[in-house]
Amino acid sequence: MKIPTLLLAGTLVSTGAISAVALARGRATAAASFTDEGPRHPGPDSARVELFLGGLRAADPILCQMVADQLGNFWSSYGAHQVGLLADDSRSWESARDSLASPATDAAALRRLARGLDDTNPCVRRVAAKLLGRSRENGAALLATALQSPSARVREAAALALGHADRPESLGELTRATRDDSPAVVAMAAWALGELERPEAIGRLSELVQSRETLVRRAAAWALGAIEDPRGVAPLLPLLRDDDAATRALAAHALGDIESRTAVDPLIAALRDGDAEVRREAATALGQIEDPRAAGPLGHLLQDASPRVRRAAAEALGDLDELEVAPPELIAALASGDPSLRRAVADALAEIADPRAIDALGRAIGDPDLETRRAVVRAIAEIDDAAVTPYLLRALKDADREIRKTAAEALGDRKEH
């Protein structure tokens, strides 16, 4: 039976971080500061790693994955002032947390992390890989060995670690790993090549997008987008017609990251895909590419059945380069029953500044949603036309200070000119 997540959170802290601090006090490994060129705190020792991984192994899977997602993203000391913390928080856990945010250098800790690559719990393997990868050159030899392990599970985790290590020297061994017998290892190695962002990997990734394995095609598509080289467009385009919807969505996402106008027409065609996520990614990609040829098709997408797709279309229209005429569907969407769509539409109209939207914006100036009203007034303020003046004067009477300020500044600018 699973222990409830909140209870487990307390258990994890008490058995992992706090116990690790007690151990560290006797080893003189905590509370050190490094130079500006290096970590502020020393990395964990083997005892701390053991307690941390053991706590995660015992934790509710949701808690473990949350920790794995955030590992290294936000851990930093609050300092001595304790602002934003509860009064009875002893902070005895702080040095343990800070050590886990720094690269491991202790040889025993590195070996323990390497053993974690073979843990039966996939979340623990993920955490061990992330920590080992973030140790960079300190764990390089261990990762090279792990990548040759007879266990596919270990090889996959080693490739994950190399992706987190982000070391250009890994290019060769990761490329070789894309020829592994295990599709899971190949896919992870492809992902890691994307993390390196090296154009030299484009040739191999272009081969992998033709794999029979769905997992491999997805990873190769993502990696080509991460490298952001125009040479990745040609191998990605066929994936927009892949049998797997997630692969099509990843291909659209990758094409948006590359931002090549040669992908505009295929992405416009993808706006008619039967999968909503593919349509959303295609719309977002067209906004990133900023080609005004997409304006009409994106306008039609504002009538899509999916709210997420409609919002993506509105946002993309605001991103299009030098678009001066708002599609009629965009202006009409100001009357949508979805406040988040109305906000996105108003933001897009602020970028386009089409005088033909003045009347619709004027009708929306009393929108019940505050953020929408703010966006509407910003859009009105951007339009260089005398017809907006009555609406700006009306906005001066709004209860919201930000709206009044926006209107006053816009009226002042008009008076000066």
Image: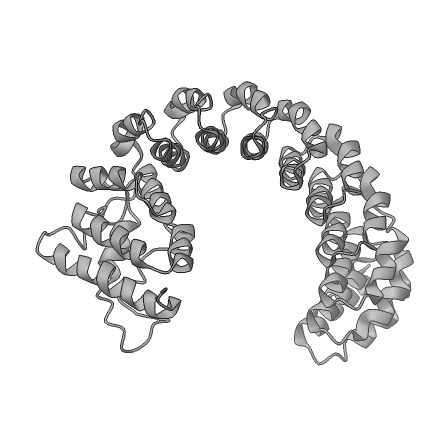
Q: At x 73% / y 59%, what residue is drawn?
A: 307
Image height of 123 relative to 192, above or below: below
Residue 38 visible: yes
Asked which quadrant contains residue 263, the reply is top right
- Along the horizontal axis of the image, is 363 left or right of 2? right
Q: Work out which residue is located at the far left of the displayed protein and give it.
A: 26
State which quarter of the image contains the C terminus: bottom right
Q: Quadrant of residue 295?
A: top right
Q: Is residue 354 left or right of residue 111?
A: right
In the image, what residue occupies the spot 81% across and 40% down? 294
* Quarter of the figure that contains the N terminus: bottom left
In the rendered image, residue 119, in percent from the top left (x then y), is placed at 30, 43
Q: In the image shown, does 49 or 35 lie closer to the viewer?
A: 49
Report whether residue 413 is seen.
no
Residue 283: x %, y % from top left: 73, 45
Q: Nearer the viewer, residue 115 or 304?
A: 115
Q: Name the foreground residue: 157 vs 25.
A: 157
Q: Position of residue 332 (x, y in %)?
A: 87, 60
Which residue lies at the image location 43% right of the left edge and 30% below the top edge?
185
